[in-house]
Amino acid sequence: MSKHTPGPWEIRRPAHITWNGPTGAFEIYAGDKLICQRPWAEGNPQAIKEHEANASLIAASPDLLDACEEAITLIEGWDSGATEADVRRVMGLLNTAIAKARSEGRSG
């Protein structure tokens, strides 16, 4: 059993982000539990985008771990009867986790 807070984790972006506004943070939650905050920099659009990408990667961590563990289980059990449906399911988990990490599966 993992010691981290169970997923899914999601980013809650402040509704008041402006490129020249005050410094704030992207918050990562598991349900109602705050996991961490990833600050974003005042008046620097590139830094805000980088901080948001970092927050997306943090929020995707439980999904990435689960997908990797499923992939390893599938690969290790390949000789014992994994099916094409098993492969499709694990590929879906991996693709979803990667999209979330890349902020393509935006939440919050």
Image (cartoon, rainbow, N blue to C red):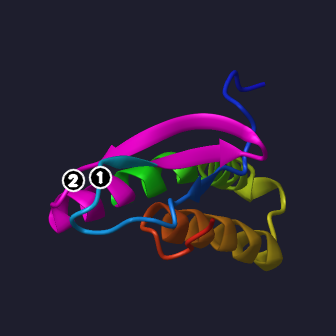
Q: Nearer the viewer, residue 81 or 28?
A: 28
Residue at 72% from the left image edge and 57% from the top image edge: 78
Identify the amino acid type marked 2.
Answer: Glu
Residue at 53% from the left image edge and 35% from the top image edge: 36
The part of the image, by quadrant, that contains residue 21 is bottom left
Q: Can residue 46 be seen in this view?
A: yes
Q: What stretch is highlighted in magenta?
A: 26-52
Residue 17 appears left or right of 35: left
Please rate how many residues cluster around mark 2, counting C-alpha atoms within 10 Å: few if below 14, some from 14 to 19, many from 20: some
Residue 49 appears left or right of 74: left
How many numbered circles are shown?
2
Question: Sequence-wise, which precedes: disc 2 or disc 1?
Answer: 1
Q: Does the magenta stretch include residue 84?
A: no
Residue 100 screen position, x and y as percent: 54, 66
Tell me the quadrant of the picture where the C terminus can be found. Answer: bottom right
Q: Are marks 2 and 1 in contact (CB under 8 Å)?
A: yes
Residue for badge 1: 22
Q: Can residue 65 be seen in this view?
A: no
Mark 2 or mark 1, which is nearer to you?
1
Residue at 81% from the left image edge and 77% from the top image edge: 85
Q: Nearer the viewer, residue 64 or 38?
A: 38
Q: Is mark 2 on a helix, strand or loop?
A: loop
- Is 93 above or below relative to 71? below
Residue 8 appears left or right of 60: right
Residue 32 screen position, x and y as percent: 77, 43
Residue for badge 2: 42
